[in-house]
Amino acid sequence: MKKFLVCAAAVALALVGILAGCGEEEEEVKRELRNLPEDVVYAVSKEEHTFTYTDGDAEIEIYGELYVPEDASNVKLPDGKLPAVILCHGFNGHYTDFPNECRRLAQRGYVAYAFDFCGAQSGGKSKGRTADDYTPFTMQKDAVEVFKHIQSLPDVDETQVFLWGGSQGGFVSALAAADSAIKDDVAGLALYFPAFNIPDDWTGKPEAKTSLMGYYIGAEFIKSVQNFDPFAVIPAYKKDVCIVWGDKDALVARKYVDGAVTAYGADRAKLTVLEGAGHGFGGAALTTAIDTVMAFLEARTYKPL
């Protein structure tokens, strides 16, 4: 009889757990979009922001700038924590490469963080690697650690953190979004002319330090991407993807962005082609690109928990 009662109690506890789990799932399904009015524009503050993490024997210090929305006189920030977007620069790029995007994000109630990949540029402010030992996969580690760090900030809604990368930073952002450490947490992925061509460009080339576009591709970088197939890896990320690419891009051929859409699935990944735009957006193309990504983000940003 006692054995029966113990078993019955265990079953009851299990049912309570199942019902609690169902309740949590139901709450997630019912979560509402933020739907910030179109005329809401917040004041913006900007500050330096660094943190460290350990990669093997190396201590990596990440340097970047944090853009934060502030209450304006006629509007209040949403109650609760804020969504956040992490911006990842391209080859030989810097944390300063996304001023328009960061400001626009903060004006619309997002925390935005742009940073230097460690060792990946001339004059970079992040520390711990050099041109000889950075690779797309060390950059992936940087992006994953940045993501986890931004998630942990007291004013950030950990369920609403997005990745946005350009060129090599787009390639790396896609790898980071598929990383098992964060793939279920990345709320959405936006890519400018993502350089999924990088492995093909370096496969078969001598594994030696090579000067390129004002900086270097190291031997370790070349070795790491030999015969690597990004399209076999990136589908591990299961949420929505926004890709913006110009049809005059001389560095990233159309087949690579089409390959990404195929890998993700056309139901999850949408490609916007900007006519006449090259590799790097400016003027009207930049405005359209930012508008496209902002619409993508805002359609996937929920009210704070």
Image (cartoon, grey):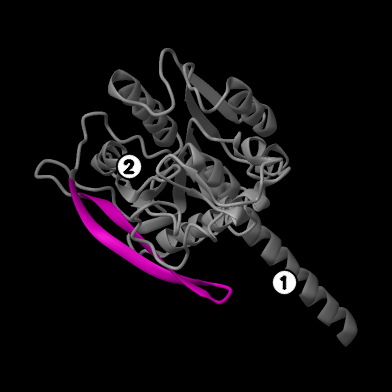
Q: Residue at x 41, y 59 (%)?
A: 150
Q: Residue at x 49, y 30 (%)?
A: 193
Q: Would you say residue 50 sits in the magenta stretch?
A: yes
Residue 254, visible in the rendered structure: yes
Instruction: Please state the horizontal and vertical placement of residue 300, each as a whole percent of the image.
Output: 46, 37
Quadrant of residue 74 within the rendered picture: top left
Q: Which residues are magenta?
A: 44-69
- The residue pinned by badge 2 equals 97
Distance of mark 1 from mark 2, alpha carbons?
54 Å
Image quarter of the C terminus: bottom left
Q: Earlier in the sequence, mark 1 or mark 2?
A: 1
**For residue 229, side relative to residue 131 (left or right):** right
Of tags 1 and 2, the one toward the viewer is 2
- The residue pinned by badge 1 equals 13
Residue 26, visible in the rendered structure: no
Q: Would you say residue 67 sits in the magenta stretch?
A: yes
